[in-house]
Image (spheres, helix red, strand yellow):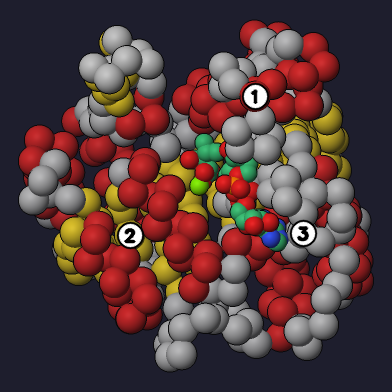
Amino acid sequence: MSRVVKLAVIPGDGIGPEVIAEALKVLDAATASSDVTIDTTHFSLGANRFLETGDVLTDADLDAIKAHDAILLGAVGGVPGDPRLVGANIERGLLLKLRFSLDHYVNLRPTVLFPGVASPLANPGDVDFVVVREGTEGPYVGNGGAIRQGTPHEVANEVSVNTAFGVERLVRHAFAVASARPRKKLTLVHKTNVLVFSGALWQRTVTAVAAEFPDVTVDYLHIDAATIFFVTDPARFDVIVTDNLFGDILTDLAAAISGGIGLAASGNINPSGQFPSMFEPIHGSAPDIAGKQLADPTAAILSVALLLAHLGLSAEADTVNTAVTADMAARTGEARSTATIGDAIAARI
Ligand SMILES: NC(=O)c1ccc[n+]([C@@H]2O[C@H](COP(=O)([O-])OP(=O)(O)OC[C@H]3O[C@@H](n4cnc5c(N)ncnc54)[C@H](O)[C@@H]3O)[C@@H](O)[C@H]2O)c1
Ligand SMILES: CC(C)[C@H](C(=O)O)[C@@H](O)C(=O)O
Ligand SMILES: [Mg+2]
C-alpha cells in the first residue's frame, strides 16, 4: 500500500520560491518510482504576504501546518532595512514562531566539502562535520526590552535564556549523533570564560551526559577560537554542539568554507515527532539576486534529502544525495541558472 506524506511547503520570499521549485522537482523525481506519495500544501507566508494582508502567521496557519508530516521552507524576509517591514518582525513572527511552536529544539546543520567543490581555503582537508545548534532558546527567545529608547540614555537588553531542560535534551541528542558517526567526536563550542552562568550549565551538562556515551571523545573550544579552526583546520571537527546564536553564525561560516551558502542545508527537528520537523536551506531570501534565476538551489535540494531521511525514506534520500554529489563533481565553474541546476540534478535520479 502506498504511503502518503503530507508536506507543508512554504516557498517564502525572494529566492525562496525559485529554489523550492527545484527542490520539489527533485523530490518528485526521487519519489516517482517509490511507493510514497507526497501530498503538498502550499502556504503563502512571508514578507510579501505581510505587505499584501498585514498577516505574518495566524493561528489558523499554524494549526494547518501542524496537520502535516513535515515542512519544506525556502526563505522568508525582505530587503534588510525595508521601512515597510519595520515592526513586522517576519523572522521572529514567522520563522522563529514556527521553530518555537513546533519545538524544533535540534537545528541540524551538516557541512560536507563535496568532491569537486572548491573551498576558499587552500588546504581544507576532509571537511565533514555537523553542527547541532540549539533551536528554541538563547537570545532568540525574545526576552528583552529597551528603556529610554531613542535617547542618549537608552538601555537595550536581549537576554540569553538557557534552561537545564533545554540544554540537556539538545546535548543528549548531539551525543547520539556523534555516537552514530565513525569518528565519534563531539566539540562543545561556547564562551565559558565570559558567559559564566550559561557556559557553566552547558559545560556541566556535556560532562554529565558524556558518561552515558563512553565511546564519544569530548572536546571544548571557545567560540572565537572555533572560528580560527574553521578556517585553519576544519577537518578536526566531527559534531559540534552549541547554542542558538553561536550556531547561527558558525553555520554561515561553515557554508562559506565548504563551497558557499547556496550548498548548505538544514533541518529543524522535533525529535519526539509530536510536531512536524522543518527543512530549509541555511541561506535567506537573498533580495540582491531574487527573480534572476541566479540562486543555487542545491541547499534546498539537500534539505529535501534531510527531509526524506528524517521520514525514514533512506533509499530516496540516498538517491538525492547521490545525484547532488554527481552534479557537484561535474560542475565546471560555468554559470547555470537555478532551473538548469534543478533539472540537471533531477535528471540524474
Ligand atoms: N531561513 C530564512 O528564512 C532566513 C535565513 C537567513 C536570512 N533570512 C532573511 O533573508 C533576508 C536576506 O538576508 P541576508 O542578506 O542577511 O542573507 P542571505 O542568506 O539571504 O544572503 C547573503 C548573501 O548570500 C547570497 N546567497 C544566499 N543564498 C544564495 C543561493 N542559494 N545561491 C547563491 N547565493 C546566495 C546572497 O545573494 C547574498 O549575497 C533578510 O530579510 C533575512 O532576515 C531568512
Ligand atoms: C532569519 C534568522 C531568524 C535565522 C536564524 O538566525 O536562525 C537564519 O539566519 C538562519 O540561520 O536560519
Ligand atoms: Mg543564519
Residue at image coords 42%, 37%: 135
Q: Is residue 100 above or below residue 256?
A: above
Seen from the viewer's position, the closer of residues 227 and 315 is: 227
Res. 295 mark: 3
The label nearer to you, 1 versus 2, is 1
Secondary element under disc 3, as helix, strand or loop, is loop
Res. 240 mark: 2
Label 2 beta carbon less than 8 Å to ligand 2: no
* 102 lies left or right of 214: right
Type of amino acid under label 3: Ala
Residue at image coords 83%, 29%: 41
Nearer-N-terminus badge (1/2): 1
Query: Label 1 neighbourhood size at 10 Å, few (<14), some (14-19), many (20+)?
Result: few
Name the image quarter holding residue 74. top right
Type of amino acid under label 2: Ile
Name the image quarter holding residue 319. bottom right
Secondary element under disc 1, as helix, strand or loop, is helix
Residue at image coords 82%, 82%: 334
Seen from the viewer's position, the closer of residues 222 and 100 is: 222
Secondary element under disc 2, as helix, strand or loop, is strand
The label nearer to you, 1 versus 3, is 1
Type of amino acid under label 1: Pro
Percent of width and height locating residue 69 = 68, 33
Label 3 beta carbon less than 8 Å to ligand 1: yes
For disc 1, the marked residue is 83
Nearer-N-terminus badge (1/3): 1
Q: Is residue 185 above or below residue 31?
A: below
